[in-house]
Image (cartoon, helix red, strand yellow):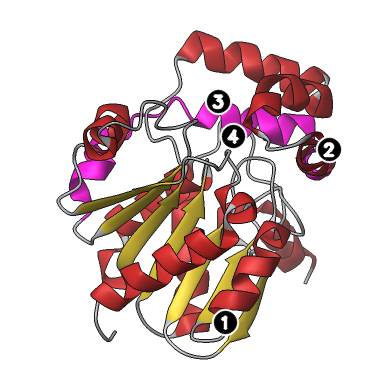
Amino acid sequence: MRLLIALCLCLPASAQSLAFSKVGKGPGLVLIHGFAGNRGVWEDLARTLSERHTVLTVDLPGCGDSAPPPPGPVDFAAVADAVATLAARELGGPGVVVAHSMGGLVGLRLASRHPEQVRGLVLLDAPLLPMEGVQAERLARGLEQDGPGTFRERYGRFAASPEQLDRVVREAARVSGPVLAAYTRGRTAPTEAEVGKVKCPVLLVASPILLPLGENPDREARAVGYGGFGTLLVVRLPQAKHWVMWDEPRLVGRAIGEFVATLGKP
């Protein structure tokens, strides 16, 4: 018995159960939060989407109520595999993945590695280009020393209001500095090959933070890492900041609903 317990404790976080919530009934949606967040960021949108869908919201490793990831840079492929295992068990069939910000790196790998489980991929203001190594390391060290303070300094301009910034900083404070640093270091991994493997339709819902010019959103999106998708739809929300599902909940919900409708029945 002691040996069994020891073996369980040694399992990497990607092999352990992820904390999640499930609401609604109908075709499945998997909602993946962004950097330093948790499944609570989806509360309002999940309530709306659950009127027509089974909505699964997940805490990524080290966030919310999920166990921390293994030591070292986060392996987004391993995290995607863990989410895929959970989604297969809870939804029982293919679903649509909706991912915000850094969660897009998980959603991307979920779609590329488990195409039979992903009918469509929705990315909300999600940067796909890898971070430059020196920049990532500098940010990671700051997060290790002062997670909330570094988060506020780095991402303050992404928030729509001081109150919103306070909210995301409070959530970031729930995640340990080493875990924030591990995700940051993991973001240096290349993504181009993963993008090329995605066969399902992709919807990008973006703010001016990701697509600042807005004159040709499709072309601009392809210039920031979205060029390899076979089918890409782009919706730009000019009044939103980075947390688009909070700033424009009605428009985001409508964009997701219309996108899912184009996919037909599961």
Residue 59 located left or right of residue 93 = right
Looking at the picture, tell me which residue is in the foreground, 209 or 59: 209
Q: Is mark 3 on a helix, strand or loop?
A: helix
The residue type indicated by label 4 comes to Tyr
Q: Which of marks 2 and 4 precedes in the sequence?
A: 2
User: In which quadrant of the rendered view does residue 262 lie?
Assistant: bottom left
Q: Is residue 151 magenta?
A: no
Report crowding for label 1: few under 14, some 14 to 19, many 20 or more residues within 10 A (C-alpha): some
Q: Residue at x 61, y 72 (%)?
A: 46
What span is colored magenta in the figure? Answer: 171-198
Q: How far apart are marks 4 and 1 (CA)?
A: 30 Å
Which label is found at residue 185?
A: 3
Q: Which of these two is toward me, 248 or 260?
A: 248
Residue at horizontal 35 percent and vertical 59 percent from the top:
121
Name which residue type carries label 1.
Ser
Q: Residue 59, how many percent across, how many down?
A: 66, 58
